[in-house]
Amino acid sequence: MLLNKNNTKICLTCQQFECTEYRFDKNDKVLVLDFYSKQHPDEVICNYCGSNSIEVHDNNTTLLKDLPIWAGIKQKLSVWYHRYKCRECNRVFSEDIGFKDPDARVTLRAANAIKELLSLGLSISSVSQYTGIHWDTIRKIHTHVMEDALETRARLLKEQGYKPTYLAVDEFAIHKGHTYATCVMDLETGDILWVGKGRATEDFRKFFLEYDMDYLSNVKAFAMDMNASYNKLVEEYMPEVDIVYDRYHMQAQFGKEVLGVVRLNEARKHQEMAKDIKEIRDGEIDPDIRRKLKAEYNEEQKAYSTLKNSRWSILTNSKNLADSRKYALNTILEEHNDLAVCYAMKEEMCRLFELSDPKEARDRWTSWFEAAKESSIDALVHFAELKQKRLEGLISHATHPISTGKLEGLNNKIKVAKRVGYGYRNDDYFFILVRYISMPHNFMLIPRKT
Ligand SMILES: [Zn+2]
């Protein structure tokens, strides 16, 4: 219905509203349809006391954003409505606009279309471009959808008498790594229970102050990285809960701070040796000796680059190494005692995390730390001295074999969230989004309760 104002009369009705006029702004490409209420006070009952003795108090106009009929042309509904006054209780209330979204100044059909487009995975800015509706309005609608779904999920879990048993906490980079957030996950359901800005101890304290601790009264163990001070707060607020240090963080740190350091030390020794040989070689010496020195020099250089390139083989679990790699690794280890010791300690550490008997775990972790401290390898001694303070949290892995691994898996979902919310610096929105996408899929499209 391409409208020509001179010879076409339009008459659209929607509930008690009627539209006979439109305005088109060529410059801004906005089409405004004017709707007027035809409701009579006799048809109305008081919102507060239910009385049907109502009069018109005054009139008002609101501008609702709508979906475009024509691509590229923004559409708005100007709605002229009554405000009523109850003769019984004297209160004033607005006429109900049935096609308006309850939370935003958009039409219901626009709100529904926005929800549909977002659920297909379109980003907020794409939806904003398509509908011509400001992205802040879209974010607002999306927030309501997510909050409703989260509330519904929480209510249903509570009704079933469900309470979490195992939790995990970890930090995440947001906004290209400049700022951080701390997440707490229910390890059984995968739900993110809480997201807070920052990664300092005091940032995490908010979790214990804000969250419903009664819901967490059955928690047995909490998985975490030992480097953050998460443990202190768990001890303070949940003294009955066992702390379990995450094996993957521990192994990664050992790889970096022990194996990495020792490997590069050894590599550097070869490099220095090569340099010394080169100096002698370049002096005035017998040609035969020079040839010999050249061969030695090449050997040292080769050993240096072999070590430099062995990072992956050393860090990978030996079970997963191909035979040729294993052979090359063994050659390296045979020639470098410190590295061989640290490598053996790494393999033993992996086995310690497979134990399920707490008593055995205590004995073997204690032996592991003693051996490490007696190694006189600086990096290993230092690592052991630091980590032995956390012995109890390492042993409790035998009783509760949990980790923060599942929480790491959320990283990919967070990438998706960043894409959907692209361009937003609104942390609250982003945090709700993270919790929302951590829910099981069937909860994510729950229609709004009206
Ligand atoms: Zn009333």
Image (spheres, helix red, strand yellow):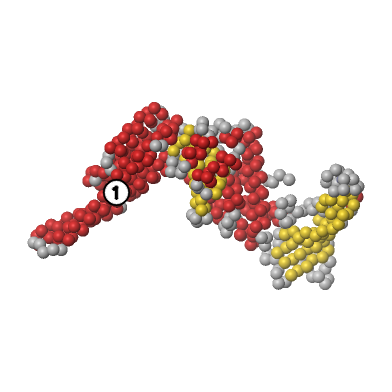
Q: Which of 187/202 is in front?
A: 202
Camera-nearest residue between 61 and 72: 61
- Indicate left or right for 91 with 399 as reference: right
Give x and y (percent) for residue 393.
43, 35
Q: Is residue 223 above or below residue 104?
A: above
Whether residue 226 sits left or right of residue 322 in the image: it is right
In this view of the protein, which residue sits in the foreground, 415 or 72?
415
Q: Residue at x 61, y 37 (%)?
A: 212
Where does residue 369 sit, x and y in percent of width and height? 33, 36
* Image-based side of 228 in relation to 151, left or right: left
Q: Which type of secondary structure does the marked residue at label 1 adopt? A: helix
Residue 440 at least partly seen: no
The residue depicted at 62 percent of the width and 45 percent of the height is: 444
Q: Which residue is mark 1?
A: 263
Which residue is found at the position 26% from the left and 50% from the top?
A: 266
Q: Is residue 60 left or right of residue 229?
A: right
Quarter of the rendering containing residue 424: bottom right
Expressed as whole percent of the image width and height from the top left, the position of residue 46 reads 85, 46
Q: x, y (%) of residue 302?
A: 23, 55
Residue 33 in sight from this viewpoint: yes
Q: Residue at x 20, y 55 (%)?
A: 273
Quick one: quadrant of the C terminus? top right
Give the answer, above or below, for where 427 lies relative to 398: below
Residue type at tag 1:
Arg
Q: Nearer the viewer, residue 116 or 182?
A: 182
The answer to whether mark 1 is within 8 Å of ligand 1 is no
Label 1 crowd bin: few (<14), some (14–19), many (20+), radius 10 Å: many
Q: Which quarter shows the N terminus?
A: bottom right
